[in-house]
Amino acid sequence: MPKARKKPASIDAPPENAHILGAGEVVRQPVTETMEHNYMPYAMSVILSRAIPEIDGFKPSHRKILYTMYKMGLLTGPRSKSANIVGRTMQLNPHGDAAIYETMVLLSKGYERLLHPFVDSKGNFGKVYSRDMMWAASRYTEAKLDPMAAELFRDIDKDTVDFVDNYDNTMKEPRLLPVRFPCVLVNLNSGIAVGMASSICSFNLAEVCETAIALARDPGHNIIDTLPAPDFMGGGQVLYSRALFEGIYNTGRGTFRVRAKYTYDKANNCVDVYEIPPTTTAEAIIDKVLERAKAGTIKEISDIRDETDRTGLKITIDLKRGADPDKLMARLFKLTTLEDSFSCNFNVLINGSPRVMGVRELLGEWITFRTGCIRRRVGFDLNKAKEKLHLLEGLAKILLDIDKAVRVIRETDEESEVVPNLMIAFGIDQVQAEYVAEIKLRHLNREFILKRTADIEQLRKDIAEMEGILGSERKVKNIMIRELEEIARAHGKPRRSELVYAEELPEATVEQTVEDYPATLFLTREGYFKKITPASLRMNDQQKCKDGDGVAQAIEAGNACDLLFFTNKCQVYKSGAAEFEDTKASVLGDFVPAKLEMDEGESVIYMAVTRDYGGYMLFAFDNGKIAKVELSAYATKTNRKKLIRAYSDKSPLAAALQLEADGDCLLAASSGRMLLFHTGAIAPKTTKDTQGVAVMTLRKNHRIVDLHTYTEGELKTPARYRTKNLPAAGVVATPEERGEVQQALEL
């Protein structure tokens, strides 16, 4: 049976969304209002609920995982599959299993990131010092809480911290953990939020506890006396400067350096690196060393390999015969991440607000938090003790006449009247009467009652003591100090990171080890570069170029020279001739803007070649001014590849010229006038973007078209083009001399 054709919609029928109010209407909304309503809630969520740790030292993701494991009984029980832990954690943390598992890995002992890991792991959990050694899937690994985690949850059931609903209001979770030590400083912690970040280095547990105790006793304590420097799980050497760390401790911000530790194996002529900075990996170090070796900066190395095994990290560097291992390592510290910096930013959430604090202020906030936990715990115990004392005092009254209590209960006709009758008979309140009424018949004997009431005096003493604690700030702090001392004795470990005084280290110099040999450097008008050896140039000196392109500069130099490529955007890019491969005249060469990663639309207009940055750069501008800049202004101590404001942008650049020393130069204008002048008349500047001085006066609608070094015999009557004073208008060249100059320029 054929299907019925669908009746076409009427042209006059209303659209499907006609019933939606405002459908299809374009509403203009200010961008500030959009950000306030859409972006700000997201930003605040990232800051408050994800990236920034709180005073207990944990981010919400850390806290949810650890609390889930605690509720699973993994503090004392056997290990559980990681997949099971991840699944249970999703009841508190509504994120993917991969993100939860990665967070658990970072807390584990096997990953070797934390000085005091809280997860006792079994299986492959990867390594923090390896970029390629990934952890196994959660179904293959097992975990439980480390005994150290007991210090995080002790007394958590005694109202020491607030509990809040989870994301779907089906469970309760702690707002903070009642940590018994300053965990916020003991373990490494970092995170990037929106518009802010946090980076907290780790410190030795025993030193942190000692510092917290000293501050509790004396708020004016000098922190650096008991907390000299950070300590990392991976060890290494912290370059120590007392003034530097005092600044970090005071402000909560700063940068210090950590270098690797190594030993020299004389029998095998190799260096074994066994501890590295916490901010790098073995693979990153090897890649950087190989890069330097290929560039020719380091020639003492014959091989480098990763020999990390179950015993720990090991990077082996094989040396060539005669190489000095200490000098080599000093250079590697300067050139690679074998020495790296750690940036501190002690940004912590305090009562829901991010604050960057120094160590003193941070420990002060923790002491306030911990004393609050102790007060809440003592208050909880006090209430329990008072409740128990109240019940026992009611039971003690029953002791006066047990038979009477039995008779009152037996002679009561209705069950609901038992409690009121006991209250009347013995003068006790309803709570006490309920307690007496619930006593089993077998316990209604003098022995049981005497045993239960024997604790009344001790309870009264305990209650008085707890009330005394709550009324004394000193007693509360003494409890905190006693707990810190116990933790330091039970879990304290020797420092892993060695302190090395930075001022006592020899200054490492990077020697120039680039092979030097003669080479001719070519730059074309469109920005192609060639480096050709004399032997190759003798075989073929016809340079291949693209259609419409040609050689702009040809300079005889060496492979160890530095190259400065000036561009049309007033910038200069620095490179070494050794960074370009030797080539032949029959190839196009390297395209410099692509090789040096220049900005879009940027092109090379001039190439300067130098070894010692001696001499000058001359910049001739359209307006007749010439700037003379010392070439040393482009030398930098760091390896910066790009310098901005390489020359002035106030007037278009007509020509650039490199000079080894002052001499005669010939300047030409579009009007046909030429001026011969000595560059010594122009004072050199160290400011790269100087506007220069007026050298040639120009008529309206004319400009400078060329500047080059004058060679003897280039002009038939050079005195005709000279002038005693600058600026000068120059002289109109004769047709013969104009042609000879043009021919010299083309050559």
Image (cartoon, helix red, strand yellow):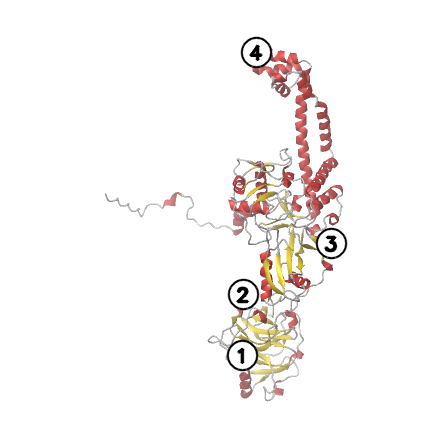
**Quarter of the C terminus within the rendering:** bottom right
Mark 1: which secondary structure? Answer: helix
Asked whether disc 2 touches disc 4, contact meaning CB atoms under 8 Å apart, the reply is no
Foreground disc of the pair 2, 1: 1
| Disc 2 to disc 1, C-alpha distance | 32 Å
Q: State the residue position of label 4.
A: 413
Q: Earlier in the sequence, mark 1 or mark 3?
A: 3
The amino acid type of the residue labelled 2 equals Asp
Asked whether disc 4 touches disc 3, contact meaning CB atoms under 8 Å apart, the reply is no
Identify which residue, 81 or 731, lies in the foreground.
81
Mark 4: give few (<14), some (14-19) or many (20+) Cα within 10 Å: few
| Disc 4 to disc 3, C-alpha distance | 84 Å
The amino acid type of the residue labelled 3 equals Arg
Residue 209 x/y as whole percent: 71, 43
Q: Which mark is residue 319?
A: none
Left or right of 414, for residue 332: right
Q: State the residue position of label 1.
A: 537
| Disc 1 to disc 3, C-alpha distance | 59 Å
Q: Which mark is residue 242?
A: 3
Mark 2: which secondary structure? Answer: loop
Residue 365 x/y as whole percent: 68, 43
Residue 162 x/y as whole percent: 61, 36
Residue that protrudes farthest toward the front in the picture:
267
Q: State the residue position of label 2.
A: 599
Residue 214 visible to an observer of this rendering: yes
Q: Earlier in the sequence, mark 3 or mark 2?
A: 3
